[in-house]
Structures are given as C-alpha cells and as structure tokens.
Image: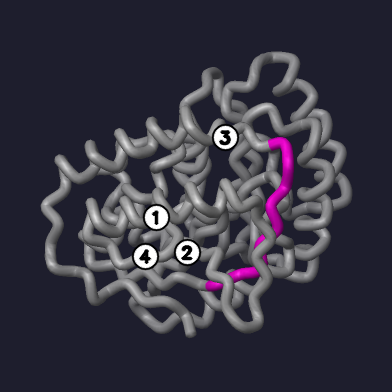
Amino acid sequence: MKDDKADVLLVIPCFQESGRIGAFLPGLCAAMEADRGVSMLVVEDGGGAAEQERMSTLINGWRAEFPSLLPPLLLPENIGKGGAVYAGWQQGVGFKWLGFVDADGSCAPGEVVRMIAMARAEPAPPRALFASRVKMLGRRIERQFKRHLLGRIYATMVSEVLHVPIYDSQCGLKLVPATAFEKVRHVLSVHGFAFDAELLLALLDSGCEVMEVPIDWHETPGGKIRLVRDAVRMAGDILRIRQRSRLPEWRHALRRDP
C-alpha cells in the first residue's frame, strides 16, 4: 500500500460524495503530484453498494493519472466522519504524519500543501496542526452567517466545557503525528462530527502540543450537516467527553500560529 518515499497519509472521508468529489479530488491530486511524500486515501463511509461502486470507478480512473492516490477503502456500514478518518489512519503503518481533509473542497489544495510543508518543518517532538477558520489579516473566510454563528456557539462550548483555549476545533483539515495518534487511539470513542474535539483533548492529555493554523476557507454547498439536529448531537458528545476527561493542566500547550 505505502510508497517507500511517502511520509504523509492524507485521508479524505466521504459519505455519498461521488456527485461532487470530482470538483475537488483531481485538483488535490494534481497539487500533490510534485510531492511523492504524500499518499491519499478516500474512505467511503458505508454509503451503499451503488454509491461505493460509483466512487470506486471514479477513484480507479484517477489512479491511472495520479499514482499517489491509493485504492479506496470501502466501509461496510456508516460509522460517522470520525470513524471513517480513524479507519483510514489505521492503514497508515510506516507514515510519519496522518491527516484528513474534507471532500467538499472548502479547504483549497494550496492550503493542504502549505500545512503539509509546515508539518514537515516541525521540530521534534512535532505538534499536531489543526486548520482554523480565523478571519484575520491575510486570510479569507467565506461562510454563511448562520453557520458561522452556530460554529462560534459550538466553539465556545468546547472551550468552556472542556477548558480548551481553541478558536475552531471543527475545520476539516488536520495533521497529526503518527506517534501521537498511536498513543491516543485506544481512548477515542466519538465517531460523529464532534470527534475533532475528543481528538484534540486526547492529544493534549497525552502531552502532544496542538497548533491552530489560520487558513483560507470557502464554504461549499451540498454538505450533509443539518444545523439544529447535528448541533444537538455534537453538544451531547461534548458533555460526554467532559464526563470522561481528567482535564489535566495542559492549557498552555495549545497555540495559534501568528
């Protein structure tokens, strides 16, 4: 599975995304072609036999042009975005970095390339890098107001309930040192949309520092999230994470890239 030169496994979690992944994945693959150190793995999260056949046909067609694109991982049932990411990462034996990027293209290929370069430049022991939709000088964020508002409410809940000083735990682009993931994988039980918060907490609890990296971000229509329904589910997950957590004194370990 693994190219001997590859040090980054980038997972693209998908649930019934065959209709729009073509607008993103070939461009991402093209951006990665000059970098033989990145392998990309699409994980189809139990979208049904017909959907998985369509996705397999697309991926296998693109693989002829892009050798860094691995055969898709087809999960027999839907286990949630976090579950799909972790299923992909568990295939990452021999990689130094494990990452994921959302299939909708909200994070442009250039931003993925930039964050991978930042990860490789990390001194030992490396920090995990979480992309963040921070509207600041030099960064462009395009997002519906209602989604921005709900996102800020959720981020505030994560910060206050879990005592994590983070601006944006949910942005769909992250890179984690493989050694750090191995330390925490046994405690990760949230597989839905709140999995990012549990991953963040577990990494910090294990001693792995996490840095937020502001990126350019453009909201793409057609997502699977239902704002009110999923907000309630995510809030419930956060409360359950809090009940299980020891909340050690690692607050100083999370930084935001200037």
Residue 67 position within the rendered picture, expressed as x and y whole percent measured from the top left: 78, 52
Residue in front for this viewpoint, 106 or 184: 106
Does residue 111 appear in the picture of this structure? Answer: yes
Distance of mark 1 from mark 3, alpha carbons?
16 Å
Q: Secondary structure at mark 1?
A: helix
Please, what is the three-letter code of the amino acid marked with disc 2? Answer: Phe
On the image, the x and y values in percent for residue 86 come to 45, 41
Q: Say which mark, if any, is on residue 225.
A: 3
Q: Residue at x 23, y 67 (%)?
A: 207
Q: Is residue 225 magenta?
A: no
Looking at the rendered structure, the kind of residue marked 1 is Ala
Tell which of 94 and 125 is nearer to you: 125
Which residue position is annotated with label 4? 166
Identify the residue shown where x is 42% and y is 76%.
Answer: 256
Residue, x 22% and y 60% (percent of image)? 163
Three-letter residue code for mark 3: Ile
